[in-house]
Amino acid sequence: MPTRKSVDSLPRTIHSLTLQVIPKKMKYLLLFFICLISVSCSNDKELLGTWYGHWSNHKEKAPILFKFEENTLIDYFSSYDTLKYHTSKNKLIINTKTGEKNTIIYKIEKSELQLFDSTNDSLLFTLKKSKKKIFSLDYLSDKSLKIELPEGNGIEKKYSPNFKFNEPLYIAYKNNQLVANFRGITQIVDENFHEFVSELAVYNFDEKFYVSISIIADKNTKLKDIESINRQIRLADLNKVNYILSSNKYEFSKVFPFKLPRLSTKEISKYNLKIDEFYNPWTPYKLDSSKCLIINIEKSKIIINNEVVNHDNLKAKIISASKKDPELIVLYNVSDNSEYQDYITTLDIVYNSIIELRNEYLLDKYNIEYSMLTNSDEIKEAKKKIPFIFLNIENFEF
């Protein structure tokens, strides 16, 4: 009976003897197949990981985010399906939910994944291997722009067909000038920037006729410049923004959805805008100061009535004032030195104070908790009862 050592050495001996008796041509053929299998395994390993890119069709451009795990593919934006796949040489065979098999030709070179139509070899799209900590920064085409996202709670959302990261607008300083990257083009932001955005934007209206745009701005951007960007977005007839915050998960984003005020009659006249005949311009009106809480946002601090308040005090003031008047209007004033991070910090406190009040209202009346991810009749009631109103003071008179 052979020892364990002799058993372990048997395959090597048999392999050596086999090669001696195999004809020379067959040896080369066998070695070729061994190399082919090695290359295939190498390609499989290279395929693993997260890949990002976009597909485009005329004016429309949409992001792509794939994650390849062992025999599993997650397609985040298209269908958010977890699909089974396997590879054969340079072919990617994907098992669909309906039981069909889709075959795609793939090629990996220098951290780029090219996918081809197997029927005509035409290039479908090119993806890049993830490098940044989060997808929103990987997706930026102009790598010369340096962006550090602001910190905040926001609403954590996973990229999916319901959160498609549409119309990302990147904002930073370059050579001491405020610039924005939109649809792969970097442009200086000036008073005509809205024309550039309007020309490139794809207006996919939802049931409420609001178009959303994702703002990915450096946290040290002057707040007055962010306000200027928002004005230009409104002039481009984009009415809703998603402020994208820093996240510690690649395929997630922390988001602050925010509805911008309608264009005023003054703005329409000043910029000579052509608007739809059904458009209802916003008319500035006088406010009763007793129904307002006025906040001054300065660099790294918040001031109310000439008094610096910490985060807990601000939250307490908002909750106290809102309980007296559920339709409380929180107005903010922007100082010359305040930055985007200061705005997000303040917005975070105001927003979560209102959420806490809505949650308290629903627990008392229906014994259910408020959820930012559902829109039931009870949630709608809480929103109407305790609205979130956070506006720039410059739009109002007293």
Image (spheres, helix red, strand yellow):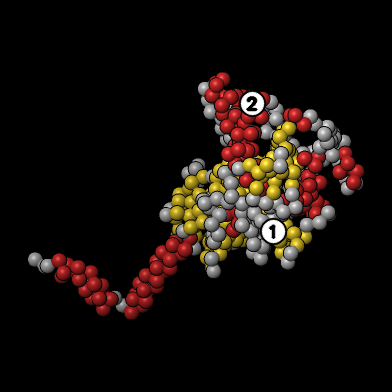
Find the distance from the CA under tag 1 to the CA under tag 2: 39 Å
| In this rendering, position of residue 37 left or right of residue 180 | left
Coordinates of residue 316 in the picture (x, y in percent): 60, 34
Looking at the picture, tell me which residue is in the foreground, 184 or 189: 189
Looking at the picture, tell me which residue is in the foreground, 29 or 326: 326
Looking at the picture, tell me which residue is in the foreground, 218 or 204: 218
The answer, for residue 165, to whether it is visible in the render is: no
Q: Which residue is mark 2?
A: 323
**Residue 244's disc number:** none
Kind of residue at disc 2:
Lys
Mark 2 burial class by Cα count in 10 Å: few <14, some 14-19, many 20+: few
Q: Residue at x 56, y 54 (%)?
A: 134
Q: Which residue is mark 1?
A: 172
Tag 1 secondary structure: strand
| In this rendering, position of residue 296 left or right of residue 164 | right
- Farthest residue toward the front? 307
Coordinates of residue 112 in the picture (x, y in percent): 56, 64
Q: Residue at x 70, y 51 (%)?
A: 338
Kind of residue at disc 1:
Ala
Circle nearer the viewer, 1 or 2: 2
Query: In the rendered image, which quarter is residue 21 located in?
Result: bottom left
Query: In the rendered image, which quarter is residue 274 located in?
Result: top right
Q: Is the C terminus in the top left, top right, bottom left or bottom right quadrant?
A: top right
Tag 2 secondary structure: helix
Q: Residue at x 8, y 66 (%)?
A: 1
Against 376, residue 108 (above or below) is below
| In this rendering, position of residue 325 left or right of residue 35 | right
Coordinates of residue 152 in the picture (x, y in percent): 58, 46
The answer, for residue 16, to whether it is visible in the render is: yes
